[in-house]
Amino acid sequence: MVIEERRPALFLLSVGEKLKPFFYGKHYVVIVALFTAFIYYANLPLLGLTVFSLLATCHLLFYRDLSTFMPLPIFAVLLLSDFTVFNTIAPFLVLLIPFFALIFHFIIYPIKKLFVGKALYSFIAISVALLLGGIASPFVNNYVYGLVTSLTVGALLLFAYFLFTNYFCPPENFKANEHFCFMLLFLGVTLFLELLIPSVRDSFTFGWGSTNAGAPLLLLSICVGWYFVLYKKYSLLSLPLLAIQYVALVLSNSDACMGIAFVMTPVFLICALFIGKVPQRKQIVLSSLIALLLIALIVVFSILAFSNEIRTLVNDRVLAMLDDNGRSGFYATAIDEFIKYPIFGVGQGYTNDDFLLKLSGVVTFNFHSTFFHVLATMGTVGILAYGYYFFSRTRIFMLDNTPFSRFSFIAFVMLESYGAVDTCEFNVVPIMMAVTLFIVVVEMTARTKKQQLPLIDYRLGK
């Protein structure tokens, strides 16, 4: 389908050209990250949403390409120290501005040729499975309670994937994949700054969500941090940013995520020592060895000076990582419900009086595992749809054999490993929005690279 493009007004073009160095520069990402942390500390969510809405509106009106628009939907929720701002109509009016700007974006920059991404049909499949969940169970009476979850996890992410794949057209010589990874690093910096607040660490909540919603994002940022360290020319400058990601992960107190990072870090260190492809490789090797030596000395000193305290701390941490925190009960319940309703499951509106969980228009029952949650709430239809969904996304990571694609896949595997003990696939913002846009960047980067390969014209006489 080809639609003739309508040229936007000249003033939009001229203003957009003047602002391009800002929106396509790394300072933009840093400013968004630090501004987000400031708004969180100052508890000025309406101001933050207003500024984000204006930035989104400018980008939607000035540019066809939406590759640098991506930080806004990911960072937006991190502005909120709580959700009381939505008790008034003001934030909804503010958010209407970028909504109308998006409509104008479609008018000013119509899709010239419809692109069907490799994961599009799998997004449609899970959207249908989510909506069908529970239709043959008694919990269909609670269908409305799970509707927000069903529509956001399915239709909203489907729309995001379609939108960004069809409007991913960055300027020439702009490395959108590197820019996105840089954004993830500063997403980790923002989480670090928010986790510094004692009340957050003590209550394990950001105000916009639990620390279990932030820790998986840190798995992504740690992985891309190692990618910068190993393969980019400013790798030495990336080391402090990488260290911040690890500190933030410790502050999050997420045992599962810390365990995954602990298992993967030796792998990354081996890569840093033997396969790094940057000019400062010797310095990185030396820095890694010095860091390991310092850690070893600190551990030895701590054991000698505080042997009893260290032993207790280690024992407590190991027990915490091995403890399922009551999840086995949720998993057994999920299996029981699947046996009773094997086709469509119990739906997102499922309730269970044996577990004390909050139920509202947004928060539904949590089986504390992506697999068991899909099994119970969507039954066989859901398992098939999500199997296709995982296959489609994995296939995208295999499109291009580059360090970026490989490290992106490792990041995806790390996050989904955490999904074995938490339903991170059902946390739309920020987790799944970040993952979906990550997949868009990987797919479109590989596609752009193939389009740029030299072509041979076999027509007669050419």
Image: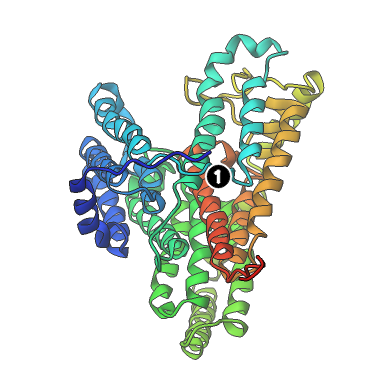
> Which residue is depicted at the point 53% across and 46% down?
436
Position of residue 213 measured from the top left corner of the image (x, y, whole percent): 49, 44
Position of residue 252 measured from the top left corner of the image (x, y, whole percent): 46, 52
- Decide which of 318, 155 is in the foreground and name it: 155
Which quarter of the rendering shows the C terminus? bottom right
Question: Does the image show residue 14?
Answer: yes
Q: In the rendered structure, which amino acid carries the disc numbered 1?
A: Phe
Q: Residue furthest right?
A: 339
Q: What residue does disc 1 label?
A: 115
Question: Coloured how?
Answer: rainbow
Circle 1 crowding by C-alpha within 10 Å: few under 14, some 14–19, many from 20: some
Left or right, residue 395 beside residue 425: right
Position of residue 8 measured from the top left corner of the image (x, y, whole percent): 27, 43
Q: Which residue lies furthest to the front in this view?
A: 461
> Which residue is depicted at the point 40% across and 78% down?
234
- Decide which of 63, 56 is in the foreground and name it: 63
